[in-house]
Image: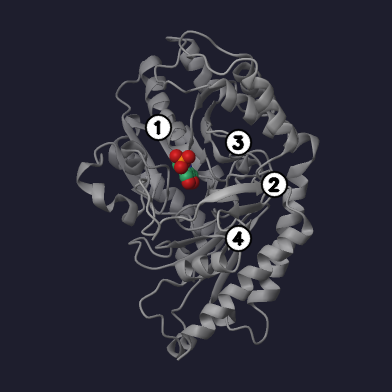
Amino acid sequence: MASTAILHRTPWRPPVSTTAEGVYVELEDGKRLIDGVGGAAVACLGTNHPKVIKAIKDQLDTLTYVYNMQLSSKPAEELAKFLVDSSDGAFELIAFASGGSEAMEAVIKLARQYYVEIGQPKRKNFIARQLSFHGNTLSTLSLAYHPARRAPYADILDTEHFHHVSPAYAKRFQRADETDEQYVERLRQELEDKFLELGPDTVIGFVAETVVGATTGVVGAPKGYFTAMKAVCEKYGALFILDEVMSGMGRMGSLHAWQSVGDGASPDLQAVAKGLGGGYASIGAVLMSPKVSRGIMGGSGLLKHGHTYQAHPLACVAALAVQKVIVEEDLLSKAVENGELMSKLLCQGLQAEGALSRPFCFDIRGRGAFWCIEFDFDVLEAATLCSRGESFAMAVQARCFDNGLIVMGMTGGANVEGTKGDHVILGPAYNATTEEIKKMVDVFVQSVEEILKEWQT
Ligand SMILES: Cc1ncc(COP(=O)(O)O)c(C=O)c1O
């Protein structure tokens, strides 16, 4: 391994990238990769959109930094206005952060601030879901529930204020004798029971990823689920909170994921991040509904939470430019079109007669620029395979890389214990061309087939 002074997040030293163009990244050894997942479902416009680059360069010549407790900036004001104006009345105020975990941390504190300000300080409990991910700070790890990511910190996580109910993951957890409506009703009842167990007037809110990303892999809830969960929150005067850090800002083909895949159930509070700045800058945001905005404006009238780099002018100008490009180039429609093509090609490649992957391809799911291929080896055909203890998803991720494609492999999303599961996420740039989508799928299918061939005994 080449030497490095960075404590990396992988057991290997990640290769060093030098340049990038669109969805392609070049490494220092000259290797060129196509990025099928935009980093971590971030680079929604590829890496060097001329309009975004120009906006950042112009801002560099104008104003690089101000501290948000002393000065605001034009890019921050304009970006906040854009987010409010594009929400059809769902949101009234915005707070900025520098990423997804910070945005979710702010959501937690803001939700609590809201109840303190409206005179309900008894509310101190959050209910979130198993197999969720809301960030890597201690509070967001406590809020979420992914066994492996919690494990080293379990003893110092907050189990007093953060509680969990079942995931909404029909393909794995809906019973065979249950209709969709019955499944939704079971989950609704479970949430209501949790409210009653904790004391309904102690609950701050229910928190969910509109589309679960980095645990179970692009899992949307059954129709009617979010309407039902929101109704429970409303019944007991608690907040309905969505984490769209990964699925929001266009990835599902609508600006907010709840507009296309969340029953249109607008939240009281929402976090966004990755697609907001598209990787051109570190930025996240909290979007506040009129109810929360007015509660706070009727109290202290200010955000009692913040960070030094919040509302950074360069980050805001980059995010504003990204959002303008999405509108001007009609990229929400393009993302949906690309998604339809990706789905068709994935099905053709992985489920074709004679494809080695066919028996193990448990699910191909997604929409827009967010796709997951879930594999399952609890089938008879797996008797002919020898994995030598390797995870299939991670083997596929590595082989894709060797073959020139970046994808995201994940394990542990198929059961609540986090001990089973192999899935791979694809999340192309919204403006990827048809040829680029085809290339991503071709290399992916080829890599899957290669690994399965090698695993045959
Ligand atoms: C749903 C969700 N929330 C929060 C986060 C944390 O975001 P960040 O990595 O920017 O801190 C992620 C990251 O993947 C996420 O998927």
Residue that badge 4 annotates: 31
Pointers 2 and 4 in contact (CB under 8 A)? no
Which mark is drawn over residue 105?
A: 1
88 over 136 or under it: above or below:
above
Q: Nearer the viewer, mark 2 or mark 3?
A: 3
Of the pair 366 and 440, the residue shown nearer to us: 440
Give the class, few, some or many, for how many residues have Cα within 10 Å of label 2's Cα (few <14, many ≥20): many
Residue positioned 46% across, 23% down in the render: 309
Q: Nearer the viewer, mark 4 or mark 1?
A: 4
Which mark is drawn over residue 124?
A: none
Q: Amino acid at mark 4?
A: Lys
Residue that badge 3 annotates: 280
78 over 228 or under it: above or below:
above
**Which of the marked residues, 2 or 1, is nearer the chain's N terminus?**
1
**Which of the marked residues, 1 or 3, is nearer the chain's N terminus?**
1
Pointers 2 and 1 in contact (CB under 8 A)? no
Q: Is residue 323 visible?
A: no
Which mark is drawn over residue 253?
A: 2
